Image (cartoon, rainbow, N blue to C red):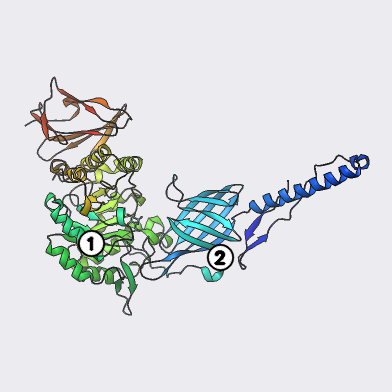
Amino acid sequence: MARISFAPHPHRLGWVAKDTWVLQQRVLKPGAVFLASRGEKIMRMKLVVVLVAIALTAACHAQTLTGRWAAVDNQKLDNGELQRWTLDVTQTGNELKGRVIGLGYSVDVKGTMSASHFEIFGWESKTPFVVGDAVNGELRGKQWGNAFVAKPATPADELPRYDFIEPPPLHKVAYNGLAKTPPMGWNSWNLFENKVDDATVRTMADAMVSSGMRDAGYIYVNIDDTWEGMRDAKGNLQANHKFSDMKALADYVHSKGLKLGIYSSPGPRTCGSYPASYGHEAQDANTFAAWGIDYLKYDWCSAGNIYKNDALQPVYQKMGDALQAAGRPIVYSLCEYGMGAVEKWGPEVGGNLWRTTGDIRDEWESMIENIEKQVPTAAFAGPGHWNDPDMLEIGNGHMSEDEYRTHMSLWSLAAAPLLAGNDLRTMSASTKSILMNREVIAIDQDQLGKQASPVKSGAFETWVKPLADGSVAVGVVNMGAVAAPATVKASDLQLKGAVKSARDLWLHKDVHFEGGAYTATVPAHGVLLLRVSCK
Ligand code: GLA
């Protein structure tokens, strides 16, 4: 079979032939031609022509992606800039391996090429984040849903380079006295992504009050990525056109008895490629304080293009110091996806919470994966410093009610921050009843600040959390696909005496332990959540 392969040429657009092609003749046996009639000869020649055509067609499809590609997204960023990234890739057979470097991130990738179609996976193995086709020497497709066109990279396509700034020597940043219980609030990312603006935040703050969320304890209204504009002549970071006046927005949010959060990165760019705080830490901390910001989520993103993971602690310490120097109480939320054993040094850099996992998705598997991933960090949670398995997906529509109840229960048993990620303006009664279940919130907000860990038995996972008043919260999650009876034994709860009272926190009713045990049916992916007391 003919084999021909193409590679992107670094200095020219389009494909150039890399290997010469070889046609393997397999039509006639030697000598057979002398015995053939004229009609047979014509037939055979036709056959050869057809085979050559088939071989050439196949060859054209057997392109290789090997090389460096420069991509530009069709859609501009909200600050008017072009979203750009490069793909360095090697193709071996159908397998692709390489690295994608964007303005705001870099990630090792793997993928497959089938005829002209490619699928490339980065942070997670189930959904490709770059998909497309090689067409006429270009790659066309979607990256995270955004259409792009990539061409063989030229020197002009190099992404901006930044001077290396040496991370500071380590020291301890004093505790800021905040987040004595896990922070509660709302964040724009899970549902709105880049569709967040001033009006969304204001109306969300209104809904936080009118829905009862504020009174249930949800205080922080947090703007995630894509608010950023450009820096002015003095280097001060401006908001983009979606946020006309951050100070006025903060005043509005404060007038509702709420607090305002914002987002940046220790790298030059955020994960969404917007300008971030690299080299401007003190200046940005001062800007945030002057605007009246109360919470900063600081997301590693493009810091990974500059620093190795061993620099995580000093780099986060730099902003920890800057926030303290800015003189306003600002909750400091580290977002580094669980890298670098953050739970061991998070409090040292002034962190009040730190991510223990990659990004959550509104799916059962993702929610369970995130909460289980942070189990080894349990001993490091406590008042003022919390493990963060990412924000809530409750009410976003892709899990069942039972699954959302389990989500809320697990986050509360794990003393996780409760940052709603849904549209508070249009919440269903069911979503409200889950997010605002005060008996469950009380488990999350318990003063002792213990993070539960699971014990697995068959289809059940049992999470036990000691509480400040000597009682315990126990959650039994049915991981299986069918409803099943679960038994909670008092002897498994490390109570300091016999059970005096017990309450089902989702049914809102008292239940009775008989013979030292309580049994109830737990729906598939559902939870039995009890508060059990010996006083
Ligand atoms: C990262 C974070 C997310 C979100 C996005 C914004 O992926 O983990 O929570 O902040 O960046 O770009």
| Circle 1: element type | helix
Residue lying at 16% horizontally and 26% vertically, measured from the top left: 490
Measured along the vertical axis of the image, is residue 278 above or below residue 52?
below
Q: In this orientation, does residue 513 appear?
A: yes
Going by the numbered disc 2, the residue's amino acid type is: Ala
Ligand 1 shows up in which quadrant of the image? bottom left
Q: Residue at the left extreme?
A: 535
Quadrant that contains the N terminus: top right
Q: Is residue 298 left or right of residue 259?
A: right
Query: Tag 2: Cα neighbours inside 10 Å, few (<14), some, or many (≥20)?
Result: many
Residue 467: image location, x then y, percent: 14, 39
Query: Tag 1: Cα neighbours inside 10 Å, few (<14), some, or many (≥20)?
Result: many
Q: Residue at the top extreme?
A: 515
In front of the other: label 1 or label 2?
Answer: 1
| Circle 2: element type | loop
Q: How many marks?
A: 2
Residue 4: image location, x then y, percent: 69, 53
Q: Which residue is mark 2?
A: 153
Q: Which residue is mark 1?
A: 201
Q: Nearer the viewer, residue 495 or 514?
A: 514
Measured along the vertical axis of the image, is residue 39 above or below residue 64?
above
Sooner in the amino-acid sequence: mark 1 or mark 2: 2
Residue 302: image location, x then y, percent: 40, 61
Q: Is mark 2 within 8 Å of ligand 1?
A: no
Q: Is residue 185 left or right of residue 298?
A: left
Is the C-beta separation of discs 1 and 2 under 8 Å?
no
Residue 307: image location, x then y, percent: 41, 61
Residue lying at 63% horizontally and 58% vertically, measured from the top left: 7
Residue lying at 39% horizontally and 71% vertically, measured from the top left: 80
